[in-house]
Image: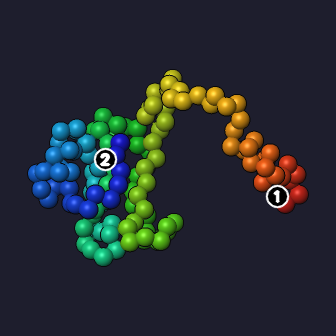
């Protein structure tokens, strides 16, 4: 999965992003929805420039995906883009641990030791 502001239209040229999609079997699942390309992801233009690209075989793992309204969560000249996946399907039922916590403490434990997290619930 690759996501970002690519500053180009998919299908506009047969090089660059289109070449990457072709060579790696990538599609934007949002654009597979009818009518999805009838708006802009960039506030100062009329084109879709922001994409989430996935292998076509991952389509069944997607629960939902789309673009947010401008300024919905972040002040930007681009729309926010999101994808939610079924993690069991996406990663498999027995995912591999990529990195172990070798220090034995979590970030919450470190913040508690620094006095940044209170153990009382009086303000909740």
**N-terminal of the two: label 1 or label 2?**
2
- Residue at the farthest bottom position: 44
CA separation, marks 1 and 2?
41 Å
23 up-or-down from 6: above or below:
above
Residue at x 17% of width, y 42% of height = 22
Count of labels shown?
2
Looking at the picture, how far across and down is residue 60, in whole percent? 37, 37
63 vs 4, left or right, is: right
Across and down, in percent, residue 32 comes to: 27, 51
**Of 59 and 104, which appears nearest the observer?**
104
Report the side of 10 relative to 50 (left or right).
left
Q: What element carries label 1?
A: loop
Circle 2 sits on which residue? 53
Q: Residue at x 50, y 25 (%)?
A: 96
Q: Is residue 47 visible?
A: yes
- Report the residue at 14% width, 59% height from top: 12
Q: Please tell me how crowded label 1 is: few (under 14), some (14-19), or many (20+) other residues with Cα within 10 Å.
A: few
Residue 26 location, quadrant:
top left
Task: Work out whether residue 33 can be spotted.
Answer: no
Q: Which residue is drawn at 49% across and 31% down?
A: 88
Give the number of the disc on residue 124: 1
Q: Are marks 1 and 2 in contact (CB under 8 Å)?
A: no
Q: Is mark 2 on a helix, strand or loop?
A: strand
Q: Quadrant of the N terminus?
A: top left
User: Eyeballing the image, is 86 above or below 82?
Assistant: above
Q: Which is nearer the eye, 117 or 53? A: 117
Q: On the rendered structure, is 106 left or right of 114?
A: left
Residue 113 percent across, percent down from the top left: 80, 45
């Amino acid at each position: 999965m690759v996501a970002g502001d690519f500053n180009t239209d998919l299908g506009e040229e047969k090089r660059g992003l289109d070449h990457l999609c072709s060579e790696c079997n990538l599609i934007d699942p949002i654009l597979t929805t009818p009518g999805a390309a009838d708006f802009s992801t960039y506030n100062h233009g009329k084109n879709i420039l922001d994409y989430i690209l996935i292998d076509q075989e991952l389509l069944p793992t997607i629960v939902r995906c789309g673009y947010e309204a401008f300024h919905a969560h972040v002040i930007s000249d681009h729309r926010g883009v999101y994808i939610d996946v079924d993690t069991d399907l996406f990663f498999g039922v027995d995912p591999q641990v990529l990195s172990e916590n070798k220090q034995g403490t979590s970030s919450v434990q470190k913040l508690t030791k620094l006095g940044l997290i209170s153990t009382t619930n009086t303000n909740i």
